[in-house]
Amino acid sequence: MPYFILSLLPLIYLIYIKSKKSIHMLQQNYYDESNRYLLWIKNNLKKVFVNFDLILFLIIVGLLFNSLVNNVLFFILVIIVIIFYKNIKEQIKKPLKITSRVKRIFITISILYLLLFAIILFNFDNHNVVIYYLLLSFITYLNYFVLWLVNKINIPVEKCVYLYYKHLAQKKLKSMDLSVIGITGSYGKTSS
């Protein structure tokens, strides 16, 4: 089991890299407003699923090894190759802005992955190591969809944050004793 836990470290880093990229795309697509994020995924399948064939092929080849240590070392090697591939810089028009909403998304996605790791570790069996690797690879492969799910899970939290700031703005406006002025006519409204 210590070898298996050790092998999760590069996988966690890969998940971080993929999650950061997918959160960036979610942010660029207005947090899936009007399904823009899903449309982006549909239009960019090569960017989203670029490594699946490589991962699956390498893991299947890795199944030829019989010992746990060889499988763990092989899995680490595969993840390191993928991390190297993912770290190749691509041109980005706008960088990811680390807002409070992005931090909440990072927390939620981390909790989901930690729950998965905890379930695997509490039910760990040396005979199922290959199955655990396939499951973790598949979930990592589907990271963009995991993020979409996280975004949906966070909707109630985001609504509460919105209502908090709306209430704060209403409170501030009430305290200012403002007069309401209506501008009519066909000239000067926009500039006013």
Image (cartoon, rainbow, N blue to C red):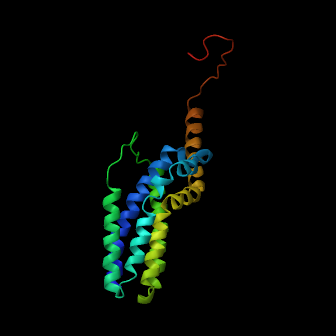
Coordinates of residue 151 in the picture (x, y in percent): 55, 55
Image quarter in which the C terminus is found:
top right
Say which quarter of the image contains residue 175: top right
Would you place residue 23 above or below residue 94 in this image? below
Residue found at x 32% / y 65%: 81
Q: Position of residue 40 (x, y in %)?
A: 53, 48
Task: Identify whether 70 is placed above or below 172.
Answer: below
Between 188 and 10, the one lying in front of the other is 10
- Comparing 188 with 173, the one in front is 188
**Closest to the observer, 11 or 86:** 86
Identity of the residue furthest to the right in this view: 185
Q: Is residue 167 above or below residue 68?
A: above
Q: Residue at x 31, y 84 (%)?
A: 69
Which residue is depicted at the point 51% across and 53% down?
45
Q: Is residue 35 left or right of residue 84?
A: right
Residue 117 position, x and y percent, is 44, 75
| Image spot of residue 182 (x, y percent) | 67, 19
Q: Is residue 67 above or below residue 118?
A: below
Q: Quadrant of the N terminus?
A: bottom left
Left or right position of 185 against 110: right
Q: Quadrant of residue 157?
A: bottom right
Q: Is residue 88 left or right of residue 99?
A: left
Quadrant of residue 61 within the rendered picture = bottom left
